[in-house]
Image (tube, helix red, strand yellow):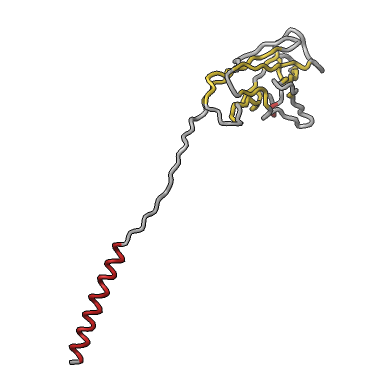
Amino acid sequence: MNRKMIAILLSTCTCLAFPAASMAAETDTASSQSISVTLTAEPEYTITIPESVSMGNDGTTVNVTASDVKNLPEGKKISVTIAGTSAYRNQMVLEADTSPRTSIRYQIISEAGDTIQTNAATGETAVGKEVVSFTEDGSKQYQIIPVIAGSYKYDVAYTGSITFGIALQ
């Protein structure tokens, strides 16, 4: 009888345990998450810098144009900077095809009125200096001025090139 009683007790305990487990499985908990998306359009712009510039003893004024400016982030501007020159160590120098070789330095007066120049003796460089900047369509100007000093010749062409960097800042 003891064995039958133990078997009945075990069967009853097993039956009582399983309905409790299945009730626990049926209990669902809900969780929610808020989703927010802000779409931003990529900035668009076109910067036009003249391909070539000629100047005389007094220098020249150069026009740079920004057009189709759209979607600039708040507080940002399109910055046109000096990225390098064709001269050794990015010096702002124009060279003449003469014998002996002659060269003249030049300066840029930025839109803000800053004088941008280089000096090989002190290591002063113009790379990274801002020439003009834009936040909307328009035209800005800077000046290029030759530095006529030292050994130079008249009536010969002094040539060189400058590369500009254009980026959002």
Instruction: Give the image quarter of residue 45.
Output: top right
Instruction: Give the image quarter of residue 144.
Output: top right
The answer to whether residue 61 is above or below residue 127 is above
Q: Return the residue nearer the eye: 89 or 34.
A: 34
For the image, the number of numbered tags is: 0
Point 49% across, 33% down: residue: 40
Instruction: Give the image quarter of residue 10.
Output: bottom left
Horizontal side, residue 65 vs residue 119: left or right: left
Horizontal side, residue 129 vs residue 14: left or right: right
The answer to whether residue 49 is above or below residue 19 is above
Q: Quadrant of the C terminus?
A: top right
Q: Percent position (x, y) of residue 81?
A: 65, 26
Instruction: Single out the residue that lies furthest toward the top.
Output: 155
Instruction: Single out the residue that lies furthest toward the bottom.
Output: 1
Point 61% across, 31% down: residue: 75
Q: Return the residue nearer the eye: 110 or 164.
A: 110
Q: Quadrant of the N terminus?
A: bottom left
Horizontal side, residue 22 vs residue 54: left or right: left
Q: Percent position (x, y) of residue 41?
A: 48, 30
Q: Percent position (x, y) of residue 145?
A: 74, 16
Point 64% across, 24% down: residue: 133
The answer to whether residue 109 is above or below residue 73 is above
Q: Return the residue nearer the eye: 126 or 154.
A: 126
Q: Percent position (x, y) of residue 160?
A: 67, 18
